Image: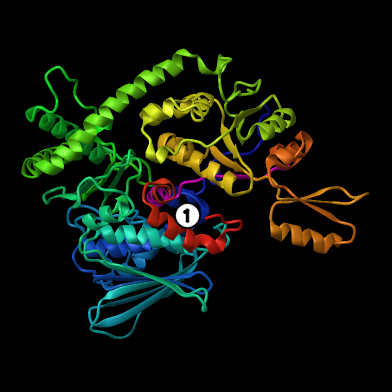
Amino acid sequence: MEKYEHEYGADQIQVLEGLEAVRKRPGMYIGSVSVRGLHHLVYEIVDNAVDESLAGYCKNIHVKIEPGNIISVEDDGRGIPVDIHPKTKISAAETVYTVLHAGGKFGGDSGYKVSGGLHGVGSSVVNALSQWTEVTIQRDGGIYQMSFERGKTVKPLTRIGDSDKTGTMVRFLADDTIFETLEYEYEVLENRFREMAFLTKGLRITIEDLRNADEVKKSDFCFEGGLISFVEFLNKNKEKLHPQPIYIEKNGEVPVEIAIQYTTTYSENIYTFVNNINTIEGGTHLEGFKRALTKVFNDYARSHNILKEKDTNLQGEDIREGITAVVSVKVKEPQFEGQTKTKLGNSEVTGIVQSMVNDALSTFLEENPTVAKAIVEKCVSASRAREAARKARELVRRKTALESSTLPGKLADCSSKNPEECEVYIVEGDSAGGSAKQGRDRKFQAILPLWGKMLNVEKSRADKIYNNDKLQPVILAVGAGIGADFDITKIRYGKIIIMADADVDGAHIRTLLLTFFFRYMRPLVENGNVYLAQPPLYKLFKKGMKDIYCYSDEERDKALNEIGRDGITIQRYKGLGEMDPEQLWETTMDPERRILVKVTMEDAIKADQIFTVLMGDEIAPRREFIEQNAKYVKNLDI
């Protein structure tokens, strides 16, 4: 290795002062500088206001997206303290916005019993990553204001008037030299604030989008029912096993609040929160909940002779089939894995949640035998289906799937065995599959043709999925199992690409496959392994001119305005099968030129609802969804 000739001494050791570290490494504090990180700025300021609510002082939070993507967050909490901080010798408010790890959320005598946010770096991080920040505080009979530019104070805290109100308003403009985009997505923020309002009973959160004067958007969230309202919202388009959610609440050193409702679906939806932070990876509170759930229902089934002596116990996955639950805990000193707080690590929380659910749920089942019987019968049915699925799964394994000549999918595998470079195209129809097989790069591209209508997994259990001749080839090709057995380290292809026609039938195929991946191979979506191919809609050609492929009506019109319309023939592709292998490679499969859309899952709650609406049993919500979104869709067939 060539030696790097450069002096290395004390002079080369950099010391980043103040908020320079945040601007130098923003990803360490907010995850990324993409649109997700941009939204994170808003969450941090709103989290501070929610913490005031959790402390019992704030009743209203008003968020605005102003023209120019300026964010305004106003609350009616106590207002940030304005007196001089004894250590920094500047106002406490300016300290909070300019000094990392300065805030009212540390230690036993802090200003908050529990809190979310970034524990003392939230406000200062937002300030550091903004072109400018302006803070207005009302407290102690006065109105105070201070302002900053890229984290540096340009106007220290100054009293500008009198007021008998209290609260804080923060306005900021994110720094366009740091973020990839400054365009906020209203629906993403709306979903987050709805969630916050569910978790904070009685808190009103409003959000307004004022960027388009002709189409102002506004949402107002306040839920006196708290988690009960949350579960009812999650299940609004599902058939319920019991009309009212089961509600459990206990205060103490670690307050716990849980709402549970079972539906006739086969999926499990448990959402966990710590101090209103969505712990998407679960943690000790989820572990305690699952343990209790399994014990309580097995004890009930035994004591009421639903499970006989010779019967094996119900497993956790049997008991969680069709469950929708929200578990919310408040922990004074939460220990999270990683800065982004996706998994709770406090070991004591497991026992606290488990004990509480054991007692409360056991009592509920004894007092509500009709509900208990309906749930337990579903669990027993799920247990039988799981056993059938196990037998089907073992049968599939014994076939040594990918080497079998009887594979109905007729997988044409690639020569490489390195998942990181391999990709599989799941192709609609035999003719398109044939073209894809001939046009592909055999080294790293595999082709799996599918035909006929696929199983709707939203209405099916795992045993039917394993035995389904349309889905079995997909399961075998991916190679990592399904459901609880899915192991993403065993996938055979780094990219799983759905390639279907650009028509109604193709859209249906894509939706069925995406529903399957979301319900039974969710880590594929979470890990970014699923893609949608984008075949062209048009080919423009004339003698003596190189063919031009267009992927939308807009591209077609733009191309016709460069080259003119004289002598141009426009071919509209109705299906992939109309393309010969060379055209399919050139337009849709060549990594140098193709367009792939990565399927992401920004919001699991929203995704669950969409799949329930589109693929579930309830017809009315699906019709409403289609009618509401018809204006965005071409070639709509209803």
Q: How many marks overall?
A: 1
Q: Nearer the viewer, residue 403 or 335?
A: 403
| Residue span colored magenta | 593-610
Q: Quadrant of residue 61?
A: bottom left
Residue 399 vertical placement versus 532 (above, below): above
The residue under the point 14% across, 25% down is 307
Element type at mark 1: helix
Q: Quadrant of residue 395?
A: top left
Quarter of the figure that contains the N terminus: top right
Residue 394 in percent (x, y) is at 40, 17
Q: Quadrant of residue 456?
A: top left
The residue under the point 44% across, 64% down is 127
Q: Nearer the viewer, residue 122 or 38?
A: 38
Q: Is residue 321 left or right of residue 10?
A: left
Residue 423 in percent (x, y) is at 61, 31
Q: Nearer the viewer, residue 143 or 275?
A: 275
What's the coloring here? rainbow
Residue 93 vertical placement versus 16 (above, below): below
Q: Is 606 covered by the magenta stretch?
A: yes
Q: Is residue 356 left or right of residue 77?
A: left
Outermost residue toward the bottom in this view: 161
Q: Is 254 covered by the magenta stretch?
A: no
Few, some or many C-alpha atoms within 10 Å of disc 1 (few <14, some 14-19, many ≥20)? Answer: some
In the rendered structure, which amino acid carries the disc numbered 1? Gly
Q: Is residue 306 left or right of residue 268?
A: left
The residue under the point 58% across, 29% down is 420
Residue that mark 1 sits on: 37
Residue 72 vertical placement versus 501 (above, below): below
Residue 549 vertical placement versus 67 (above, below): above
The residue under the point 50% across, 36% down is 454
| Residue 357 can be seen in this image | no
Residue 437 in percent (x, y) is at 70, 28
